[in-house]
Every structure is written in C-alpha cells, then in structure tokens.
C-alpha cells in the first residue's frame, strides 16, 4: 500500500497508507480545495524579511546558508510603516470587526463561508496597512466539531477569512487576534537583532576534588570574555560557556536552563501584553445552518480528528494500540510536546512499564517496555539548546547523532520534532540543525528503507516575545519545506491544535494528544 501525501495541490503516493477515496468529488475539485485549505495562506502582498542575525555574506557560503536564502520567501510577512510605533495606533482586538461577505440563504457541506474582517486601532480608526496575525475557526460546540479557516491579508487593514463547511449542523465563527502587525514587527526585530533571547547554565565539577562546583553562562553563540568552546564531532554543532575561574573547560558536567534576557523595553512590552495578545475579536456573523453535501477534508467531529488528506485510524482501546506497536522499537526525539505522546501511551496501555534510568525527567532518556509484546518505547530530548532542569551533558544527544547510531529496520519506528526550543534564536541556527537532521534521516533510509520515520509539526500555544505562535509558524514553514520530498510521514499538530475548542496551550489537552497519537499510530499500522 502507498502513503498519501500532499504535494502542492495534488495527491502523490510516498509511503504505506492508502490515498483517500475521493468519493463524489472530482480530482480537480479536490485539487482546488486542497490548494485553498490545506496550506495556511500567509498573505497576498508581502515584504521579505531581512537576513537573520548571524547570516553574513561570504565568497563561499555554506550549504545551510544557501538553503536559508531559498527558504526566506516562505517567511515573507507584511510589515507596518516604519513610523507606526505608537501603541494607540496598533491593532485593537476590541475595536476590530468582521461580518459575512456576500451572505446566502442556504449553505451546504462543501461550500465556503467567506467573512470580511476590518482591523481597527485603539481609537477605533481603520488600519491602513496589514500584517496582523489573526487565527479563525468555524465550529459547532455541541458536536465538538471544528476546522481552521484561512486568512488572506489584503495589506490595507482588511482581511478575507475563508472556512470550508465540512459537516451538517449549526456552525459558528470565532476569530482571535494573536498579534497585531506592530507586535509581529517587534518579534521580527528581536529575532533578527539578538543572537539569542535566552541563556543557559553550565555546571563545572572536578570529580574527586574538594573544589566547589562552578556555574557559568552558556549558549549557542560566542560569549563575551574568555570562553570554552565545545564542538560535537558528529554534527559539528558548537556550544560555548564562559570559562570558569578555577576549573578547566573539560570539567563541564551538567546543563540547565538559565534566564530569559530582557530584550524589549517597557514601552515595547505593551504590544505583547495579555490585553492585546490572543484576544477574541467581536463580529457580526450569525450561526449558520449547514445542510447535507459532500465532505471535503480534515476536521474535528465529536472530538475525533477526521483526516481526509490520508487514510487514518483510531485506536480507542489499549489492546488496539498495543497490537499496533507489538514488536516495535520506537525512538521519540524532541521536546516536551512529543514527550506528551510517550506519557499518553504509558498511561493508556496498562502493561507498558516505565524503566527508571535515574535521569532528569525533563530531558530523559525515558524508557517504557512491554516484554510480552516485545515493545520498547523511548523518548529523549533533542539536545542543546534546551530549556530544562539540571541535566548531565552526557545525556543530551543531538538528533542527527542518534539517527546515525540506529540500524533501522521494519520493526524500528523513529518520530521526532524540532521547533519549540528554537524560537529564541535566529533562523540560521534552526536551518543548520534541520539540515543535519535531514541528512541523517536520508542516510538512515538509504541503509534501511523499511524504517518508519514520522515527524511532528509545531503546535500552537506560545504567546510571548520568547515564543510566539508567529515565530512557531515561521519555523514550521521551514520544517515542512526542508522535509518535503523525503519518504516521511507528517503528523499535522498545527492543524490539530489551531482549531480545537480547548484553550491554546503549548502542552495541549489529552483529547488533542490522543488524536495526535492516533495519527502517529495510523502511519505505523495503516491496516487493521
């Protein structure tokens, strides 16, 4: 059987899940709907971002730098005028409004609901430019059904919201202003002007000597003054720590999160304040009654993610999930949003027992086994940079090195994610890291094509200068682009978190995690 993946506006086969039955819809209709709804429309008129901090011109640029330049057009976003700096001139969620565009008497499944939105500032004046970050969804609370809408920015303060109508019943529209265009401009400025917005701590200890532990600041970039530099032999990644006063650089033993840097002024912080971030926009769209018609694409219905991009299954009982994972060695590598999958499975399958490795839980490695069914379930953090509790440096492994250490095979499943701990750095670091991981994935699949590789996209939930949904969305665009073309399966966590009725959280609720895990298991076991 072949896995169905979206390539542009077309469906192509790239793995081991059957493509969906297009049913009553022609292929051309599917392609049109896929083109309109399966990708987030960023803007119709955009301004390219400047080169990220740390990217310098070079007579012989590295492959990663060249790739970053090719990826930058994906991140284009309208910028406000240079003099749009006053808070009262920024977009107000309370003053902005939306209403139906060309209302109709009847709507059926398969139609598109169009909504016109006008952004206004805090004085109630229409905004003359775009660049605001809105998120919208159509939903039916009583059915626990929801789908994300697309937002088209006309760059004049007006936006068109489009919602595919996918189920029968009463449908409501909800719109939230995540960030004003001025806040997005601030986030962009901070990302491109600061080498980092967080710092870490390194702990130096000389075993067998009475000298006290020394603690210094560490980061992915060089630090002022004397510093220790560490170069990973496998990936070439560099890590820097301020040199301790009394101990050698080789005495670095532990790592932990440090501090968030003060990167914006008190005046600037108003643009990212809670009163104007991730706030509901009032609108004048009545409840729409949707009549029967053809169903089109993925959405939540009765709290189950219905994916029409590719065939999917649900695993409502522990026995079904365990039967799927029988004889598998699963390697999960990433952040705490992926650790939620590990935790869900350990809690869901009673016979799956955790093996205590006496490590820092936040970073792992964590292991659970089911010996009777031959299941081993691993999770570990993706390595530095990592905001975590005090952890042994030796326990922090780069994903590329872990992949290169795997033999692979039909019983080996690899799933990873990389994004949440990279929102505090320029894009160059992220692209370089993904470049190394992508090459390691290619090597793994070349020596063992039967290995199942699954990637988890970013999810929503960040709302500050250190981690914003806008920053996450930009990294997610890079992530998808860099792994396009490889025979890997994608769990679209962004879509699953963006439209659900649960409050936005970087660590989504159990019902969302359950659907993410079901999607993952569908790739592991495409057939019942």
Image (spheres, helix red, strand yellow):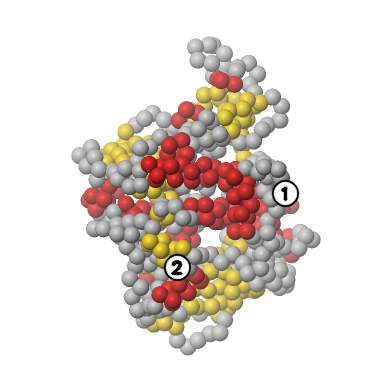
Is tag 2's residue or tag 1's residue first in the polypeptide sequence?
2
Quarter of the image with the N terminus is: bottom left
Q: Distance between the Cα atoms at labels 2 and 1?
A: 48 Å
Mark 1 highlights which residue? 266
Task: Identify the residue at image location x=33%, y=59%.
Answer: 2
Figure quadrant of residue 195: top right
Question: Which residue does the image show at 71% across and 30% down from the upper left?
Answer: 224
Please state if 313 lies on the left or on the right of 14 as rendered.
Answer: left
Q: Nearer the viewer, residue 300 or 233?
A: 233
Which mark identifies residue 10? 2
Judged left or right of residue 309, residue 439 is right
Instruction: Name the one closer to the observer, 2 or 290.
Output: 2
2 or 1: mark nearer the eye: 2
Q: Residues within 10 Å of mark 1 (few under 14, many from 20)?
A: few
Residue 23 in the image: above or below residue 466: below
**Quarter placement of the C terminus:** bottom left
| 67 relative position to 411: left or right | right
227 relative position to 102: left or right: right
Give residue 426's position: percent from left, percent from top: 63, 46
């Amino acid at each position: 059987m072949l896995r169905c993946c979206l390539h542009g506006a077309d469906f192509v086969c790239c793995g081991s899940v059957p493509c969906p039955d297009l049913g009553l819809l022609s292929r051309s209709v599917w392609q049109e709907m896929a083109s309109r709804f399966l990708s987030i429309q960023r803007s119709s008129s955009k301004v390219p971002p400047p080169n990220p901090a740390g990217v310098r011109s070079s007579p012989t640029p590295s492959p990663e730098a060249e790739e970053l330049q090719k990826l930058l057009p994906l991140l284009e976003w309208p910028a406000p005028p240079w003099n749009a700096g006053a808070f009262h001139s920024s977009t107000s969620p309370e003053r902005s409004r939306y209403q139906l565009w060309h209302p109709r008497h009847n709507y059926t499944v398969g139609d598109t609901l169009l909504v016109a939105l006008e952004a206004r500032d805090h004085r109630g004046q229409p905004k003359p430019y775009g660049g605001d970050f809105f998120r919208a969804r159509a939903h039916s609370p009583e059915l626990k059904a929801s789908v994300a809408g697309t937002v088209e920015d006309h760059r004049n303060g007006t936006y068109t919201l489009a919602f595919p109508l996918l189920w029968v019943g009463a449908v409501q529209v909800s719109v939230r202003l995540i960030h004003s265009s001025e806040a997005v401009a601030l986030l962009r400025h901070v990302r491109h002007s600061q080498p980092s917005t967080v710092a870490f701590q390194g702990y130096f200890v000389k075993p067998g000597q009475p000298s006290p532990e020394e603690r210094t600041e560490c980061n992915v970039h060089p630090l002022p003054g004397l510093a220790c530099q560490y170069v990973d032999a496998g990936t070439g990644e560099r890590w820097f720590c301020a040199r301790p006063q009394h101990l050698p650089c080789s005495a670095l033993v532990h790592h932990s999160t440090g501090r968030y840097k003060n990167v914006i002024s008190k005046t600037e912080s108003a643009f990212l304040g809670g009163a104007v971030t991730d706030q509901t926009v009032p609108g004048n769209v009545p409840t729409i009654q949707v009549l029967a018609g053809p169903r089109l694409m993925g959405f939540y219905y009765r709290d189950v993610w219905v994916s029409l991009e590719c065939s999917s299954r649900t695993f409502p009982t522990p026995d079904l999930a365990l039967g799927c994972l029988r004889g598998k060695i699963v390697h999960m590598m990433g952040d705490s949003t992926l650790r939620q999958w590990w935790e869900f499975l350990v809690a869901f399958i009673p016979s799956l027992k955790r093996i205590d490795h006496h490590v820092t839980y936040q970073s792992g490695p964590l292991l659970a086994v089911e010996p009777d069914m031959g299941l081993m379930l691993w999770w570990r953090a993706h390595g530095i940079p990592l905001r975590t509790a005090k952890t042994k440096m030796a326990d922090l492994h780069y994903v590329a090195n872990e992949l290169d250490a795997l033999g692979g095979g039909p019983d080996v499943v690899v799933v990873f994610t990389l994004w949440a701990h990279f929102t505090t750095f320029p894009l160059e670091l992220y692209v370089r890291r993904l470049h190394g991981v992508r090459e390691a994935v290619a090597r793994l699949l070349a020596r063992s094509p039967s290995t199942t590789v699954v990637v988890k996209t970013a999810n929503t939930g960040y709302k500050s200068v250190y981690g914003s949904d806008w920053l996450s969305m930009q990294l997610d665009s890079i992530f998808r682009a860099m792994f396009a073309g490889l025979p890997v399966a994608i769990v679209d966590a962004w879509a699953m978190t963006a439209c659900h009725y649960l409050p936005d959280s970087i660590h989504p609720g159990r019902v969302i995690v359950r659907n993410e895990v079901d999607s993952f298991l569908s790739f592991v076991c495409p057939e019942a």
